[in-house]
Amino acid sequence: MSTTLSAPRATAPGAATGTRTTKKGTPVTKIVVRTVIGLLLAAYAAVSLYPFLWMVSAAFKTNSEVQEGGHLIPHHPTLHTLTDTWNRLDFFDYFLNSVKVTVLTTVLVVVIYSAASYAFATLNFPGKKWLYRLFLVLLFVPGVVTLLPVVLLESKMDILGTHWGLILPGVNGSAPLAILMLTNSFNAVPGELREAARMDGAGELRIFTRIYLPLTRPALITIALLTAIPTWNEYQLARISLNDPSRYTLPIALQQLQSSNVVQYNSLMAAALIMVIPVIILFLCAQRYFVNGLVGAVKG
């Protein structure tokens, strides 16, 4: 007696395990999970954005309309609040002071710590590992711990009350994170490029400026952003250090708007909007480099 063997029947995706699938073969459970996660993230984004939207709305309202509440969209939007806030309390001078402090701090951080990170990544010198570990430890030291020593040191250096009293601590405070990220990014650059450049007669400065800096541009822009934004928003040290109204920065200007007995909430929100607009523009312009810089630093 002969027997015949029949080919096994093809089973539909998910039939063996009892899992329901769509026409494209994606499990229904996975779709449900993705949908729930998307809804939760959308709800979180809405809750996070609401204070910002309220600030923007209040900046275009009158103070009485702000105090009424109950609606987000202004009934009678006006630019008077923004223009009036800009012209009050020498707001333009405060804006220029913030730009000056932020730009100088950011430029010094990028220039100094890119060179230091290049040395950590490519050169061998005594105490290199211990010095690098020291910067890693300093990364976990909160800035408030060093606030009093910084003020005392500024007083001895005779820079207390000047913009350098904000710039130099900002440069110093950015050292751990900048060196950590930039050193990892420089380590990711192939060493063959450096050796080939040396064979062509290039010195360390030329290798640094012509090879390493262009290849690590995302990391440099990331460090610039991570330095500029905290410097732009610096209040605590500025409140202690600056005593001359002509040298006040924008955070101090916001505090001045709250010092009166009657707080004009629309003016306060207009000032906050003016202060946050440059940060938003800066981040939107450098967003692609910012993400790539963070990814590159982690991979390094």
Image: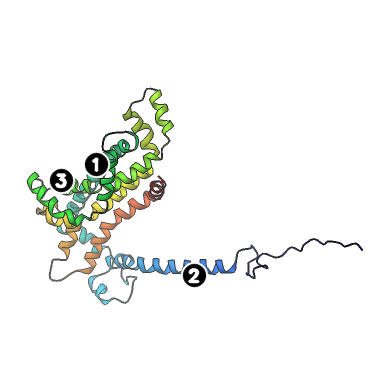
Neighbor class of circle 2 (other Cα within 10 Å; few <14, some 14-19, many 20+) is few
- Position of 132 with respect to 42 (left or right) is left
Q: CA distance from mark 1 to mark 3?
A: 12 Å
Quadrant holding the C terminus:
top left
- Position of 86 with respect to 26 (left or right) is left
Q: CA distance from mark 3 to mark 2?
A: 51 Å
Can you see residue 80? no
> Which residue position is annotated with label 3?
164
Residue 94, compared with residue 118, is above or below; it is below
At 24% from the left and 75% from the top, the residue drawn is 67
> Which residue position is annotated with label 1?
108
User: 36 or 234: which is nearer to us?
Assistant: 36
Mark 1 residue element:
helix
> Which residue position is annotated with label 2?
36
- What is the residue that sits farthest to the front in this orientation? 1
In primary-sequence order, the first of circles 1 and 2 is 2
